[in-house]
Amino acid sequence: MFRVQYLTFNIALYFNASSAEVEAAGVLSNNLVQYHGGGYIASLGVYHDIHCLNKLRRYVYRDTYLDKVPERNISEYEEHLVDHCIDMLRVSIMCSPDLSMYTFHWPEIDKALFLDATSKSPRKCVDWGQLSGWSERRMVEMVPTLIKPSQKRA
């Protein structure tokens, strides 16, 4: 059985967005998670999608991961997170659909469970080096320096 083991790579999941960037994105800042040094915690959609895909992989193959964390059960939080990730990936796919034409081929293995799908259509990809560089320069950690609006200091 084929399993995707190395889905993710090192990504700078979170970055510090300025008030101007938040405003330009059309987001009201009154209830956003603030970063201790100023600004707001943000993530690029592509990185959130990769994060969610990794969460789904770990959920599907949870037996592999549960052994590494003793006495860990699938919690209501994890089930909610899986539902969230499925819906976020659905929205992402529907909003930026890949319109490449896929053709189907008979597999070389006689007892294959499904047809092989391939595409020769050209794709336009981003420059991952440039994207990663931008993200890494602005990367922040999620914890422990987050501030709720009610915790603002005078």
Image (cartoon, grey):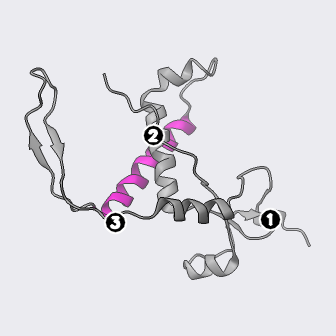
Amino acid at pointer 2: Leu
| Number of residue marks | 3
In the rendering, at what x and y percent does residue 56 appear? Answer: 44, 39
**Mark nearer the N terminus (3 vs 2):** 2
Q: Which residue is mark 2?
A: 7
Tell me which residue sits at (43%, 55%) in the image.
88
For the C terminus, the image quarter is bottom right
Residue 71 seen: yes
Along the line of sight, the residue nearer the viewer: 147 or 14? 14
Confirm or deny contact between disc 3 and disc 2 (CB under 8 A).
Answer: no
Tell me which residue sits at (60%, 20%) in the image.
68
Residues rendered magenta in the picture = 76-97
Along the line of sight, the residue nearer the viewer: 102 or 76? 102
Secondary structure of residue under mark 1: helix
Q: Viewer-nearest of labels 3 and 2? A: 2
Instruction: Pick out the residue farthest to the right.
Output: 154
Quadrant of residue 53 within the rendered picture? top left
Q: Viewer-nearest of labels 1 and 3? A: 3
Confirm or deny contact between disc 1 and disc 2 (CB under 8 A).
Answer: no
Quadrant of residue 149 within the rendered picture? bottom right
Residue 81 is covered by the magenta coloring: yes
Q: Which residue is mark 1?
A: 150
Label number found at residue 122: none
